[in-house]
Image: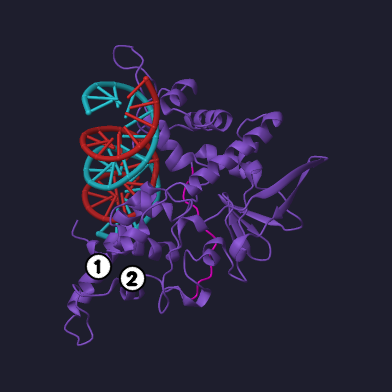
Chain colours: A purple, B red, C cyan
Amino acid sequence: MRKPEHNGKNNNGMNKLRKGLWSPEEDDKLMNYIVNNGQGCWTDVARNAGLQRCGKSCRLRWINYLRPDLRRGAFSPQEEELIIHLHSLLGNRWSQIAARLPGRTDNEIKNFWNSTIKKRLKNKSMSTTKTSASPNASDSKSHDPKKDHNNMGGFIPTQHARIMPMSTSSPSPSIQTTIDNTMMNNIEGFSMHVDGLNMQIARGSYFNAIGQCFDEYNCKGFYLENGVFGSSVNNIGVGGDMFVPPLESVSTTTITTTNNNHSNHESVEIKCKRETNNSTYFEDINNILNNCGVSNNKRAENKIRVENMLQEELTIGEWELEELMKDVSSFPFLDFSY
DNA sequence: AACGCTTACAACCGCTTCGCT
DNA sequence: TAGCGAAGCGGTTGTAAGCGT
């Protein structure tokens, strides 16, 4: 991390582009600008938003941190497994891996891989090397990736595929404020517990700020039923085949919200449409917008913009997995030598 | 409490790709 | 087709925070 520079001028007093950490004020400026005006050319975004940042820096900040559809918090064991599996197929194509993990950025996955998974698997491979004299030890050069993902050491088996409430790291102060201020609503009689960017609805369903919903009892979360983490609850991870869906199947389910003001009490009616695969996918765009300094008459317009943006971002990233699957051998499986 | 080491991750850098003229 | 600017991508760096001594 880098220290924020406290002014935008260099030694000569000339205007200079800022570098380093983003301040909450900068985040707010960028967030407000994009919500109101859309993305467009990033150079223009930087200039028009009043930021002394280069467009590239603004783009990165938006993509990796400010985007409202980001899923923050620790990676779940299911996500870990999926990342490993995808990495075995794709190598360091982080953007393509990220395209299969809605709400996760390539940068986040890359960091997670380099700091955690790589190390963990390396330790595991060293320990298995020590025990490779065992008659059952497999030849690392001839192992079958399709089987091997069931034997990834160091990972929590996901036979119990209950989706846990997503823990949170430390979101930007400005975003934290945005979420905290907006999540204390009652939704159709469900009491909600706010935990950073994640909400727990009473009766054991969880959904985070971008709206992925997980039902603690039925385990019918967006990911599970769409097969991202497996074909069924008891068939994931150890003993089950990892199923990687085509990106097209990761569809958004629009949530309709209406706000009624009743003496400072804002009730939110949520209709959650169930679409293909019975996936439940909340999107409370209003919650995102309510605290971006957006006036009421612009809110509806912005809602449509954000919805379009989210839809675009979920559908972009068509990639050639099927093509790659034809030649899996061209990708090193769990190769940590680079 | 102070120090040094490790970890996690935000952000930058440089290269490639894409789209427009 | 060449040239240019913007966007996208992966590798790398730097540092706050955590941890052990």
In the picture of the structure, the residue carrying the numbered disc 1 is A123
Q: Tell me what residue is drawn at x 28 percent, y 60 percent.
A: A118
In front of the other: A57 or A291 = A57
Q: Tell me what residue is drawn at x 76 percent, y 57 percent.
A: A189
Identify residue type, mark 2.
Gly
User: Residue placed farthest to the bottom in the image?
Assistant: A135
Instruction: Answer with left or right where residue A258 lies relative to residue A163.
Output: right
Q: SS of the residue at dot 2?
A: loop
Q: Label 1: chain?
A: A
Q: Quadrant of the N terminus of chain A?
A: top left
Q: Quadrant of residue A74?
A: bottom left
Q: Quick check: marks 2 and 1 in contact, CB under 8 Å?
A: yes
Note whether A230 is above or below A118 in the view shown.
Answer: below
In the picture of the structure, the residue carrying the numbered disc 2 is A154
User: Where residue A160 appears, x then y in whole percent?
Assistant: 50, 75
In front of the other: B18 or A207 = B18
Q: Label 2: chain?
A: A
Residue A235 in sight in this render: yes
Q: Tell me what residue is drawn at x 19 percent, y 86 percent.
A: A134
Q: What span is in magenta?
A: A160-171
Q: Please check the rendered image and state whether residue A308 is part of the magenta-colored stretch, yes or no.
A: no
User: Residue placed farthest to the left in the image?
Assistant: A133
User: Where residue A145 appears, x then y in whole percent?
Assistant: 29, 71
Note whether B1 is above or below A24 in the view shown.
Answer: below
Q: Determine crowd level at label 2: few under 14, some 14-19, many 20+ residues with C-alpha closer than 10 A.
A: few
Identify residue type, mark 1.
Asn
User: Residue placed farthest to the right in the image?
Assistant: A263
Which circle marks residue A69 in the picture? none
